[in-house]
Image (cartoon, rainbow, N blue to C red):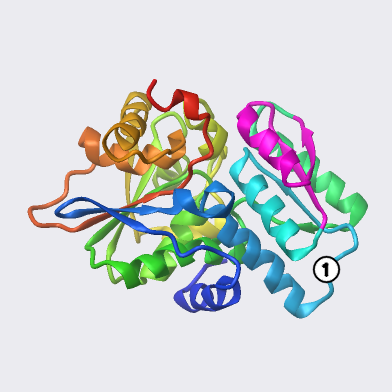
Amino acid sequence: MTVVRQDVDRAAGRIAPHVRRTPLLQAESHLVLKLESTQHSGSFKARGAFNRILAAGETAALPAAGVIAASGGNHGLAVAYAARALGVRAEIFVPEVSAPVKVEGLRLLGAHVTQVGAIYSEAYEASRKRAAETGALEIHAYDQPDVAAGAGTVAAELLEQAEFDTVLVAVGGGGLVAGVVAAVDGRAGVVAVEPERIPTLHAALEAGGPVRVDVSGVAADALGASRIGQVAFDTVAARVSSVLVSDDAIVEARRALWREFRVAAEYAGAAALAALRSGAYVPAAGERVAVIVCGANTDPATLAG
Protein backbone atom coordinates (compact mmCIF):
# COMPACT_ATOMS: atom_id res chain seq x y z
CA MET A 1 0.00 0.00 0.00
CA THR A 2 1.33 3.39 -0.94
CA VAL A 3 0.16 6.99 -0.73
CA VAL A 4 0.47 9.22 -3.80
CA ARG A 5 0.12 12.92 -4.46
CA GLN A 6 -3.47 12.58 -5.71
CA ASP A 7 -4.46 10.99 -2.37
CA VAL A 8 -3.10 14.02 -0.53
CA ASP A 9 -4.86 16.41 -2.90
CA ARG A 10 -8.19 14.68 -2.31
CA ALA A 11 -7.61 14.71 1.43
CA ALA A 12 -6.83 18.44 1.35
CA GLY A 13 -10.17 19.20 -0.27
CA ARG A 14 -12.04 16.88 2.08
CA ILE A 15 -10.66 18.22 5.36
CA ALA A 16 -10.23 21.91 4.48
CA PRO A 17 -13.35 23.08 6.37
CA HIS A 18 -12.22 21.28 9.52
CA VAL A 19 -8.49 21.99 9.99
CA ARG A 20 -6.34 25.06 10.48
CA ARG A 21 -3.94 26.37 7.89
CA THR A 22 -0.97 26.56 10.24
CA PRO A 23 1.58 29.39 10.16
CA LEU A 24 5.26 29.58 9.25
CA LEU A 25 7.99 31.12 11.35
CA GLN A 26 11.11 32.44 9.59
CA ALA A 27 13.71 31.17 12.03
CA GLU A 28 16.79 32.04 9.94
CA SER A 29 17.39 33.32 6.42
CA HIS A 30 17.29 29.80 4.98
CA LEU A 31 15.16 28.09 7.64
CA VAL A 32 11.39 28.13 8.13
CA LEU A 33 9.43 26.33 10.82
CA LYS A 34 5.99 24.99 9.93
CA LEU A 35 4.08 25.35 13.21
CA GLU A 36 1.78 22.38 12.96
CA SER A 37 1.95 22.49 16.74
CA THR A 38 -0.85 25.08 16.46
CA GLN A 39 -3.20 22.62 14.73
CA HIS A 40 -6.48 21.55 16.35
CA SER A 41 -5.76 19.08 19.19
CA GLY A 42 -2.13 20.25 19.24
CA SER A 43 -0.60 18.22 16.41
CA PHE A 44 -0.73 17.26 12.73
CA LYS A 45 -2.71 14.16 13.69
CA ALA A 46 -6.04 16.01 13.35
CA ARG A 47 -5.55 16.00 9.57
CA GLY A 48 -5.41 12.21 9.32
CA ALA A 49 -8.24 11.69 11.78
CA PHE A 50 -10.62 13.95 9.87
CA ASN A 51 -9.65 12.40 6.55
CA ARG A 52 -10.20 8.84 7.76
CA ILE A 53 -13.64 9.58 9.23
CA LEU A 54 -14.83 11.72 6.32
CA ALA A 55 -13.53 9.28 3.67
CA ALA A 56 -15.27 6.37 5.39
CA GLY A 57 -18.49 8.36 5.56
CA GLU A 58 -18.42 8.91 1.80
CA THR A 59 -18.89 5.22 1.07
CA ALA A 60 -21.07 3.99 3.96
CA ALA A 61 -22.81 5.13 7.12
CA LEU A 62 -20.50 5.28 10.10
CA PRO A 63 -21.16 2.51 12.65
CA ALA A 64 -23.28 3.29 15.70
CA ALA A 65 -20.29 2.42 17.89
CA GLY A 66 -18.42 5.33 16.34
CA VAL A 67 -14.64 5.27 15.99
CA ILE A 68 -11.87 3.58 17.93
CA ALA A 69 -8.14 4.24 18.05
CA ALA A 70 -5.00 3.39 19.95
CA SER A 71 -2.50 6.13 20.59
CA GLY A 72 0.41 7.35 22.67
CA GLY A 73 -1.66 10.50 23.05
CA ASN A 74 -1.61 12.80 20.01
CA HIS A 75 -3.50 10.51 17.65
CA GLY A 76 -6.06 9.84 20.33
CA LEU A 77 -6.52 13.56 20.95
CA ALA A 78 -6.95 14.11 17.22
CA VAL A 79 -9.49 11.32 16.83
CA ALA A 80 -11.39 12.54 19.89
CA TYR A 81 -11.40 16.10 18.56
CA ALA A 82 -12.48 15.09 15.05
CA ALA A 83 -15.15 12.75 16.39
CA ARG A 84 -16.60 15.46 18.62
CA ALA A 85 -16.57 17.96 15.75
CA LEU A 86 -18.37 15.49 13.49
CA GLY A 87 -20.80 14.21 16.13
CA VAL A 88 -19.29 10.72 16.37
CA ARG A 89 -18.57 8.61 19.47
CA ALA A 90 -14.86 7.97 20.16
CA GLU A 91 -13.15 5.27 22.22
CA ILE A 92 -9.39 5.64 22.75
CA PHE A 93 -6.85 3.13 24.07
CA VAL A 94 -3.54 4.57 25.33
CA PRO A 95 -0.42 2.93 26.78
CA GLU A 96 0.50 3.55 30.39
CA VAL A 97 3.50 5.73 29.38
CA SER A 98 1.21 8.38 27.85
CA ALA A 99 1.72 11.87 29.22
CA PRO A 100 -0.93 12.77 31.83
CA VAL A 101 -1.67 16.03 30.01
CA LYS A 102 -2.67 14.03 26.92
CA VAL A 103 -4.85 11.56 28.85
CA GLU A 104 -6.66 14.41 30.57
CA GLY A 105 -7.10 16.11 27.19
CA LEU A 106 -8.79 13.00 25.82
CA ARG A 107 -11.30 12.97 28.63
CA LEU A 108 -12.01 16.68 28.24
CA LEU A 109 -12.83 16.01 24.57
CA GLY A 110 -15.46 13.50 25.62
CA ALA A 111 -13.70 10.30 24.59
CA HIS A 112 -13.95 7.07 26.55
CA VAL A 113 -10.34 6.33 27.57
CA THR A 114 -8.71 3.03 28.48
CA GLN A 115 -5.06 2.91 29.59
CA VAL A 116 -3.55 -0.50 28.94
CA GLY A 117 -0.12 -1.93 28.14
CA ALA A 118 3.40 -0.64 28.55
CA ILE A 119 3.82 0.53 24.95
CA TYR A 120 1.71 1.55 21.99
CA SER A 121 1.60 -1.90 20.36
CA GLU A 122 -0.07 -3.40 23.43
CA ALA A 123 -2.70 -0.66 23.53
CA TYR A 124 -3.24 -1.22 19.82
CA GLU A 125 -3.92 -4.93 20.24
CA ALA A 126 -6.45 -4.15 22.97
CA SER A 127 -8.17 -1.63 20.70
CA ARG A 128 -8.41 -4.14 17.85
CA LYS A 129 -10.05 -6.68 20.12
CA ARG A 130 -12.56 -4.07 21.25
CA ALA A 131 -13.27 -2.97 17.66
CA ALA A 132 -14.05 -6.57 16.70
CA GLU A 133 -16.57 -6.68 19.53
CA THR A 134 -18.30 -3.36 18.79
CA GLY A 135 -17.91 -2.85 15.04
CA ALA A 136 -16.42 0.63 15.53
CA LEU A 137 -14.43 2.20 12.69
CA GLU A 138 -10.73 1.69 13.40
CA ILE A 139 -8.49 4.69 12.90
CA HIS A 140 -4.87 3.58 12.97
CA ALA A 141 -2.32 6.05 14.29
CA TYR A 142 -0.26 5.86 11.09
CA ASP A 143 -0.67 2.67 9.03
CA GLN A 144 -3.73 3.51 6.91
CA PRO A 145 -3.57 5.30 3.55
CA ASP A 146 -6.33 7.79 4.50
CA VAL A 147 -4.50 8.70 7.71
CA ALA A 148 -1.17 9.19 5.93
CA ALA A 149 -2.75 11.17 3.11
CA GLY A 150 -4.42 13.45 5.62
CA ALA A 151 -1.12 13.98 7.42
CA GLY A 152 0.50 14.84 4.09
CA THR A 153 -1.72 17.88 3.68
CA VAL A 154 0.65 19.74 6.02
CA ALA A 155 3.31 19.50 3.30
CA ALA A 156 0.84 20.46 0.58
CA GLU A 157 0.18 23.62 2.58
CA LEU A 158 3.88 24.19 3.12
CA LEU A 159 4.50 24.05 -0.62
CA GLU A 160 2.02 26.88 -1.07
CA GLN A 161 3.55 28.97 1.71
CA ALA A 162 7.31 28.78 1.09
CA GLU A 163 10.03 27.77 -1.31
CA PHE A 164 12.37 25.14 0.11
CA ASP A 165 14.84 22.53 -1.04
CA THR A 166 14.51 20.12 1.87
CA VAL A 167 11.93 19.38 4.56
CA LEU A 168 12.81 17.66 7.85
CA VAL A 169 10.15 15.43 9.39
CA ALA A 170 10.05 13.51 12.67
CA VAL A 171 9.24 9.81 12.31
CA GLY A 172 7.52 7.40 14.66
CA GLY A 173 5.21 5.00 12.88
CA GLY A 174 5.69 6.89 9.65
CA GLY A 175 2.29 8.28 8.71
CA LEU A 176 3.53 11.85 8.55
CA VAL A 177 6.67 11.13 6.55
CA ALA A 178 4.66 8.98 4.10
CA GLY A 179 2.19 11.78 3.56
CA VAL A 180 4.95 14.37 3.19
CA VAL A 181 6.81 12.28 0.61
CA ALA A 182 3.59 11.83 -1.36
CA ALA A 183 2.70 15.52 -1.18
CA VAL A 184 6.17 16.77 -2.11
CA ASP A 185 6.33 14.23 -4.95
CA GLY A 186 9.97 14.88 -5.80
CA ARG A 187 9.72 18.65 -5.70
CA ALA A 188 12.00 18.79 -2.62
CA GLY A 189 14.12 16.43 -0.58
CA VAL A 190 12.69 14.77 2.53
CA VAL A 191 14.81 13.97 5.58
CA ALA A 192 13.33 11.51 8.06
CA VAL A 193 14.48 12.25 11.61
CA GLU A 194 14.23 9.63 14.36
CA PRO A 195 15.42 9.30 17.96
CA GLU A 196 18.43 7.02 18.25
CA ARG A 197 16.45 4.96 20.76
CA ILE A 198 13.44 4.41 18.42
CA PRO A 199 14.91 3.93 14.91
CA THR A 200 11.88 2.35 13.25
CA LEU A 201 12.46 3.62 9.71
CA HIS A 202 16.25 3.49 9.91
CA ALA A 203 16.13 -0.17 10.94
CA ALA A 204 13.57 -0.99 8.25
CA LEU A 205 15.66 0.61 5.51
CA GLU A 206 18.66 -1.43 6.61
CA ALA A 207 16.64 -4.65 6.82
CA GLY A 208 14.66 -4.13 3.61
CA GLY A 209 11.32 -4.06 5.40
CA PRO A 210 9.62 -3.20 8.69
CA VAL A 211 11.23 -4.79 11.74
CA ARG A 212 10.54 -4.50 15.45
CA VAL A 213 12.73 -2.15 17.51
CA ASP A 214 12.96 -1.42 21.20
CA VAL A 215 11.11 1.70 22.35
CA SER A 216 12.53 4.11 24.93
CA GLY A 217 13.65 7.69 25.38
CA VAL A 218 12.19 11.15 25.87
CA ALA A 219 9.97 11.07 22.77
CA ALA A 220 8.55 7.59 23.32
CA ASP A 221 5.07 8.83 24.19
CA ALA A 222 4.60 10.25 20.67
CA LEU A 223 7.22 8.50 18.50
CA GLY A 224 6.94 5.17 20.30
CA ALA A 225 5.90 2.84 17.49
CA SER A 226 7.82 -0.43 17.73
CA ARG A 227 7.99 -0.80 13.93
CA ILE A 228 7.47 1.42 10.92
CA GLY A 229 4.10 1.08 9.23
CA GLN A 230 3.88 -0.82 5.97
CA VAL A 231 2.20 2.14 4.26
CA ALA A 232 5.12 4.35 5.25
CA PHE A 233 7.78 1.88 4.22
CA ASP A 234 6.18 1.20 0.85
CA THR A 235 5.79 4.93 0.20
CA VAL A 236 9.13 6.30 1.36
CA ALA A 237 11.70 3.57 0.72
CA ALA A 238 14.50 5.03 -1.46
CA ARG A 239 12.78 8.44 -1.39
CA VAL A 240 14.09 9.83 1.91
CA SER A 241 17.34 10.43 3.74
CA SER A 242 17.32 9.01 7.28
CA VAL A 243 19.14 10.52 10.26
CA LEU A 244 19.14 9.73 13.96
CA VAL A 245 19.27 12.19 16.86
CA SER A 246 20.08 11.70 20.53
CA ASP A 247 17.70 12.36 23.39
CA ASP A 248 20.00 15.17 24.51
CA ALA A 249 19.71 16.82 21.11
CA ILE A 250 15.92 16.57 21.22
CA VAL A 251 15.81 18.07 24.71
CA GLU A 252 18.03 20.98 23.64
CA ALA A 253 16.02 21.63 20.47
CA ARG A 254 12.83 21.76 22.51
CA ARG A 255 14.41 24.23 24.90
CA ALA A 256 15.62 26.31 21.97
CA LEU A 257 12.17 26.46 20.40
CA TRP A 258 10.83 27.94 23.62
CA ARG A 259 13.85 30.09 24.47
CA GLU A 260 14.39 31.64 21.04
CA PHE A 261 10.91 31.65 19.50
CA ARG A 262 8.45 31.05 22.35
CA VAL A 263 7.20 28.00 20.46
CA ALA A 264 5.82 25.32 22.76
CA ALA A 265 6.70 21.86 21.49
CA GLU A 266 6.67 18.37 22.88
CA TYR A 267 9.82 16.28 22.48
CA ALA A 268 8.56 14.68 19.27
CA GLY A 269 7.74 18.14 17.94
CA ALA A 270 11.34 19.21 18.43
CA ALA A 271 12.96 16.10 16.96
CA ALA A 272 13.20 17.38 13.38
CA LEU A 273 14.85 20.62 14.49
CA ALA A 274 17.25 18.59 16.63
CA ALA A 275 18.75 17.14 13.45
CA LEU A 276 19.82 20.62 12.36
CA ARG A 277 20.99 21.92 15.71
CA SER A 278 23.01 18.79 16.53
CA GLY A 279 24.63 18.47 13.10
CA ALA A 280 22.94 15.14 12.33
CA TYR A 281 21.83 16.89 9.15
CA VAL A 282 24.07 19.57 7.66
CA PRO A 283 22.51 21.61 4.83
CA ALA A 284 24.57 22.54 1.80
CA ALA A 285 25.51 26.18 1.28
CA GLY A 286 22.37 28.13 0.38
CA GLU A 287 20.06 25.17 0.91
CA ARG A 288 16.58 26.29 1.96
CA VAL A 289 15.25 24.08 4.75
CA ALA A 290 11.78 23.66 6.22
CA VAL A 291 11.20 21.94 9.54
CA ILE A 292 7.82 20.63 10.62
CA VAL A 293 7.20 21.27 14.32
CA CYS A 294 4.61 18.55 14.55
CA GLY A 295 3.19 18.69 18.08
CA ALA A 296 2.73 20.83 21.18
CA ASN A 297 1.02 18.52 23.68
CA THR A 298 3.34 18.97 26.62
CA ASP A 299 3.31 20.23 30.17
CA PRO A 300 4.06 23.99 29.88
CA ALA A 301 5.87 23.89 33.21
CA THR A 302 8.64 21.81 31.63
CA LEU A 303 9.39 24.01 28.62
CA ALA A 304 12.35 25.81 30.17
CA GLY A 305 13.71 22.71 31.87
Q: Nearer the viewer, residue 217 or 291?
A: 291
Q: Is residue 206 visible?
A: yes
Q: Which residues are magenta?
A: 89-116
Which residue occupies 53% across, 47% down? Answer: 228
> Is residue 217 visible to the viewer in this orientation of the structure?
no
Q: Nearer the viewer, residue 260 or 181?
A: 260
Q: Nearer the viewer, residue 76 or 145?
A: 76
Left/right placement of residue 227 relative to residue 243 reads right
Q: How many marks?
A: 1
Residue 94 picture location, percent across and down = 70, 36
* 253 falls in the magenta region: no
Whether 111 is drawn above or below 300: the answer is below
Residue at the image position 45 percent from the left and 38 percent from the top: 268
Location of the C terminus (image quadrant): top left
Could you tell me residue 37's position as x and y percent? 46, 48
| Residue nearest the observer in this picture, 227 or 180 | 180
Left or right of 290 in this view: 144: right
Residue 148 placed where, x, y %? 54, 61
Viewport quadrant of the N terminus = bottom right
Q: Which residue is identified by label 1?
A: 62
Task: Pick out the residue farthest to the left.
Answer: 285
Q: Position of residue 197 (x, y in %)?
A: 44, 29
Secondary structure of the residue carrying tag 1 is loop
Q: Quick one: which residue is furthest to the top in this view?
A: 305
Instruction: Check disc 1: other Cα within 10 Å, few if <14, some if 14-19, many if 20+.
Output: some
Q: Residue at x 34, y 38 (%)?
A: 262
Magenta highlight on residue 110: yes
> Label 1 amino acid?
Leu
Q: Is residue 110 left or right of residue 54?
A: right
